[in-house]
Image (tube, grey):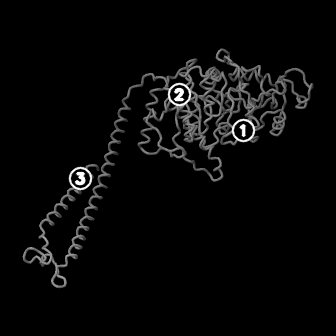
Amino acid sequence: MVRKKGSLILCSAFLFVAWNALLLLYLWGRPPIGRLGEGGGAEPGGKEEWGLGKGKGGRVNLAGEVIRLAEEVEVQLETQKKLLKQIESHRAEWARQKDVGKRETDDAKEVKEESVRQPAKTPAPLKHGVDVQDQAGLRTTQEPGRGGAPGSHSEQRRADDVKESLTEKVPPSLSGPDVVIPILVIACDRVTVKRSLDRLIQYRPSAELYPIIVSQDCGHAETARAIGSYGDQVTHIRQPDLSDIRVRPEHRKFQGYYKIARHYRWALNQVFNTFSQSTVVIVEDDLEVAPDFFEYFRALYPILHSDPSLWCVSAWNDNGRDALVDPSKAELLYRTDFFPGLGWMLLKEMWAELEPKWPSAFWDDWMRQPEQRKDRSCIRPEISRTITFGRKGVSLGQFFDQYLRYIKLNTEFVPFTKHDLSYLLKDKYEERFIGEVYSAPLVKMEDLQQAGGLRGPGPYRVQYSSRDSFKVFARNLGVMDDLKSGVPRTGYRGVVSFLYRGRRVFLAPPEGWTRYDVSWS
């Protein structure tokens, strides 16, 4: 095809040159026009050959001759113009075909080299502080607020180049105290991400063991500058697809939730597939962490990794308001059937299960559905290791003023890595926790609310038997009353544990509980 196009261009160029040569010969061979007032030509018979007529008084019609010559030249120039356009179009097509052929050859060469490539050596640690798109040559050309999903062959090749260059810089998969636990910060258009990053960097014990990856959506320039100001302390990656998502008309107001789900999927794929990490802790740009945040996740990684009945570790207590937690029990940890989010650890194996069916929106509620949870639990603390300071967001402050702003952040460093946390493994935990719950005295809510009605710090048990009774008791005792797929916030086997007026209380279903009722949501 390329050779055929080249021959066509050469033929067109030859015709152009030949035409102009014939034109010049034709003009040079014509007899010159005589002087004014004489016959048309210098030679005998010139008048007939040139076709000149005479005006009144036998004078030559010179103006008519000049006009005729001008028209003839114009026709010849128009013909040459068409020839030039044809040559130009053929040259562009030839160049395009040549480029395609070169790319196909390069691709074939890359495939051949890949098929015989030897196993890679142990990769070097993740390089910090580099804008990944600069490092790998994939900087997006989209302006802030605009974008589109990459789709061309060349863009796909650049994306493959990014992956190949980054996989040479990832840390090796380790276990125990040396496992690398990246912190993925999900950012958009809040410059207050600096508050989150300041605390993460302040409390981070090792940049090598806890690389901070900030994934930014939205294309917000001021936020990008705020992230960039940290230099080599963080790795800044940018979600390339900033386009709006086509949704049902009634979901247009939820566009933000769709974009968040898309961003999470892209960012987690970067961590697990591009950076080849084995685990990650996800925080958002409006979370502030506790001094023992890194210690907490370091100690719980082996528990999460070894217990198949667990699928996440969270730093968040949904009922973590100051009056509902025991400040003297900062080391106390629980299992929960409710997915808390807001600072949570995920393993690569779990992402491999979730990613193929990742939802287009409302990813956190999707995680709480029984089809995803599969009767698995998370670990959560008595006192939160994160708090949220971001009232601004797609949820428009839902729950923030009523609950979230009052969550207590732990300030006491707990050396979790020196504690025996095996009590959190399912069999041990259920034997101890369920035994403690149902051995606690069963009391009425009125007994708790009346001063002097009960003696001692508890624990006490308040029993609910229906969705409505749970909601009534929860509201009156000050805990969150909403249920997701039938699971109460912080609940484990239906039991919600908290403090009420300084006493430990278990809001629990009847003994012998077997399953959650999704119709309660």
Q: Nearer the viewer, residue 423 or 89?
A: 89
Percent coordinates x, y for residue 237 in the rendering: 52, 34
The image quadrant of residue 357 is: top right
| First of labels 2, 3 by sequence position | 3
Label 1 neighbourhood size at 10 Å, few (<14), some (14-19), many (20+)?
Answer: some
Is there CB contact under 8 Å for labels 1 and 2? no
Residue at position x 45%, y 22% in the image? 122
Residue at position x 9%, y 78% in the image? 45
Q: Nearer the viewer, mark 3 or mark 1?
A: 3
| First of labels 3, 1 by sequence position | 3
Specify the farthest residue to the bottom: 57
In the drawing, what numbered circle is on residue 214? none
Q: Is residue 262 left or right of residue 99?
A: right
Relative vertical location of residue 356 with respect to residue 7 in this rendering, above or below: above
Label 2 neighbourhood size at 10 Å, few (<14), some (14-19), many (20+)?
Answer: many
Q: Which residue is mark 1?
A: 484
Percent coordinates x, y for residue 313 in the rendering: 65, 27
The image quadrant of residue 378 is: top right
Residue at position x 57%, y 33% in the image? 351
Q: Is residue 440 left or right of residue 248?
A: right
Secondary structure of residue under mark 2: loop
Secondary structure of residue under mark 1: strand
Percent coordinates x, y for residue 206 in the rendering: 56, 20
Q: Which residue is mark 2?
A: 277
Residue at position x 19%, y 85% in the image? 56
Q: Nearer the viewer, mark 1 or mark 2?
A: 2
Q: CA distance from mark 2 to mark 3?
A: 54 Å
Percent coordinates x, y for residue 226 in the rendering: 57, 34
Q: Which residue is mark 3?
A: 7
Q: CA distance from mark 3 to mark 1?
A: 70 Å
Q: Nearer the viewer, residue 104 or 45?
A: 45
